[in-house]
Image (spheres, helix red, strand yellow):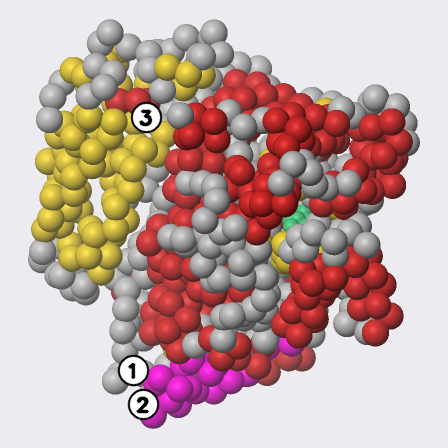
Amino acid sequence: MKKILIKHFTIAASVALVGCTGAYNDIYKDSSASVDNRVQSLLSQMTLEEKIGQLNQRSMWGSDDEAMAYFTSEVAVGNIGSLLNVPDAESADSIQRVAVEKTRLGIPLILSRDVIHGYKTIFPIPLGQAATFDTALVKAGARIAAIEASSDGIRWTFSPMIDIARDPRWGRIAEGSGEDVFLASMMARAQVEGYQGDDLSSPTSIAACAKHFVGYGASESGRDYNSTYIPERQLRNVYLPPFEEACKAGCLTYMSSFNDNDGIPASGNKFVLTDVLRGEWGFKGFVVSDWASVGEMVNHGFCADMCDAAATGFNAGVDMEMESQTYINNMKQLINDGKVSMSQLDKSVANILRVKFMLGLFENPYISTPQEIKYAEEHLQAAKQAAIESAVLLKNDNYTLPLSADKIRRVLLTGPLADAPHDQLGTWVFDGDKTHTVTVLDGICKLYGDKVSVVYEPGLAFSRDDNKASIAKAVAAAHGVDAIIAVVGEEAILSGEAHSLADLNLVGGQSSLIEALAKVGKPLVTVVMAGRPLTIGKQVDESNALLYSFHPGTMGGEALAELIFGKVSPSGKLPVTFPKAVGQIPIYYNKNNTGRPALGNETLLKDIPLDAGQTSLGCTSFWMDAGFGPLFPFGYGLSYGDFKYSDIATDKDTYKVGDVIVASATLTNEGKYPATEVAQLYIRDHVGSVTRPVKELKGFKRQYLEPGESAQVVFELPVEQLAFYGIDMKKKVEPGDFTLWIGGNSDCQLSVSFKIEN
Ligand code: NOJ
């Protein structure tokens, strides 16, 4: 009976009890009481102003006395529920002390920050981490980020970023897991589990924030903040699933995005923020707006003024507002005018308090993680492993790689990213200290400097540099060595938020540098560090081997040294399709077939005869100047091993909903080097109530094999995972014929058929 009472405890009931007993008032302080009871006990004692204060999140830039004095006084009067960007541990504890010890009810702040791919120890950018296809490693990286961040009082990170992104012009593609729904969903779960840990109330657990909700990655033309036009079915089949997976993993918070989708700014979109997130998925945490995105609904032309924006954002489902202060300035008036209901306000405040209780902030408001945990040796080793696994080998003619440290006497290390401690960390690094970075120069000298003489001539000082004299110096040095390692790409500032590009060729004089080095005729190994896929077809042709390491983070240099000299084999796979040319964008593997798919024998621009007849080239879906395919498909990546797939099979020919498809293939390493392969499972649903993609990733597994060794890779695929939103906008599995592939990338050919019956 008691249990039932607690379950149905309502705000009205709690209010009725206020003042009856001091004991009830104190329930919120009692850690043995249920979270719901604690929330209601506290809520019932809060004034309107205190409630509104909980909805307000401010950024505390600057550590000067004036900033500290201002924010301390705001916290003291209960005007702030959360701060982001508190400058250091001392300020964090000091301002938290004001919230806990100087305010009437002692409600702690939830201190937050953008801890995106590591806090102090920087891991590869999220796109690079996705290239590992290693969820355990990604989870461990998020755990490390949480431990380090909590040592400075941060208990909430604005990560994971799980926007599906199919446009590398968009600089924020760096922050997510790429183009694929399944991979992004698995990475979302891994990161949420890593940040939040096994016990939310542990002082090292930090709340995750699934962002940006939703559709932001589809910004038109890759220009950041631009509008999106995602119809509901595509939203449900492509953009929402990673967010649903984050919810299933227990993600405590969501962030509404900047974009307007089909005319509705995300921070004013009740359908996604309330109907889907809370109604369909049962989300119990809270939603924070992206930076000023509530106020920006005025710029969008969706709200008349800041007061209107506050009502629109709040009523749509944004519980906490980041920075634009429309709630704190207008909420009282909105309540008085009846434009926002008191019960809705109570619900939002309860959502925020619930998370604060779950994180144990009332019991442990101050820092207890030791400061020395930052850059711990095991953190650095995990970051190195992530950098190793994130590198994707895109070309390796005649086993140019690995270089043999016993045979090669002199190597030229060149390129603007070869010794770039800041830039190899990548975008969204506020806290990583570049003095801890191990660059490629450091890594090679440290690990192989006793065997190989390293000539370092950068060629260009930074990626946009175009100094021809420096290029000439590097080229001159190339004549006297046995092999060339050129590390090119993008500075960190060229990707990330608001850093979109219209041209994806190497910037500055880098293309000339590679071209000139190639002409020297020595084995040329090109390493690319970048925040996005670049159009590197020319460099692929000119290089004997090419490794794409995205921005690999603090330990990237040691990781690359070990990969280049063969201590380990590359195993990364592309989490996103690499276009040949910008004009192919958006290009992604899980496209629909169209009514006129390319046949592969289309006439390309250079072969079109003069005066060719209008229809003589064939009428299929392709680009005359770029063909049909990409430069590299999703899932692609070579290794020093030589992997072959054979003997694909499923355990049955026909399945029903509720069954599990057991699919397997034999994987053999026919090469000379031990290596790890990421085996991938794809399916195609041939006929649907709506058109279906030509391939969809449904599973992946990392498999290590010695030379000559074979293994059976086995996947268990629940039939439910074939469900999608069809013609009636209901999610279900449709019966019919399917093809299933197992292979090393999305272009794999080894397949088997099966049927789904009702
Ligand atoms: C804006 C970005 O879009 C978001 O990703 C970030 O978390 C917030 N600013 C806070 O810095």
Image-quadrant location for residue 451: bottom left
The magenta stretch is 437-462
Q: Which residue is mark 1?
A: 405
Residue at horizontal 56 percent and vertical 69 percent from the top: 367
Q: Secondary structure at mark 2?
A: loop
Q: Secondary structure at mark 1?
A: loop
Q: Which residue is mark 2?
A: 451
- Direction front: furthest residue: 20
Residue at horizontal 40 percent and vertical 81 percent from the top: 444
Q: Which mark is in front, 2 or 3?
A: 3
CB at disc 3 and ligand 1 closer than 8 Å: no
Q: Earlier in the sequence, mark 2 or mark 3?
A: 2
- Direction bottom: furthest residue: 450
Residue at horizontal 59 percent and vertical 21 percent from the top: 275
Q: Is residue 465 above or below residue 109?
A: below
Question: As drawn, is 450 to the left or to the right of 657?
Answer: right
Kindly identify the amino acid type of the residue bearing the numbered disc 3: Gln
Kindly identify the amino acid type of the residue bearing the numbered disc 2: Lys
Residue at horizontal 63 percent and vertical 45 percent from the top: 22
Task: Please give the count of numbered marks on the rendered protein.
Answer: 3
Q: Is residue 394 visible?
A: no
Q: Earlier in the sequence, mark 1 or mark 3?
A: 1
Q: Label 1: few (<14), some or many (≥20) within 10 Å?
A: some
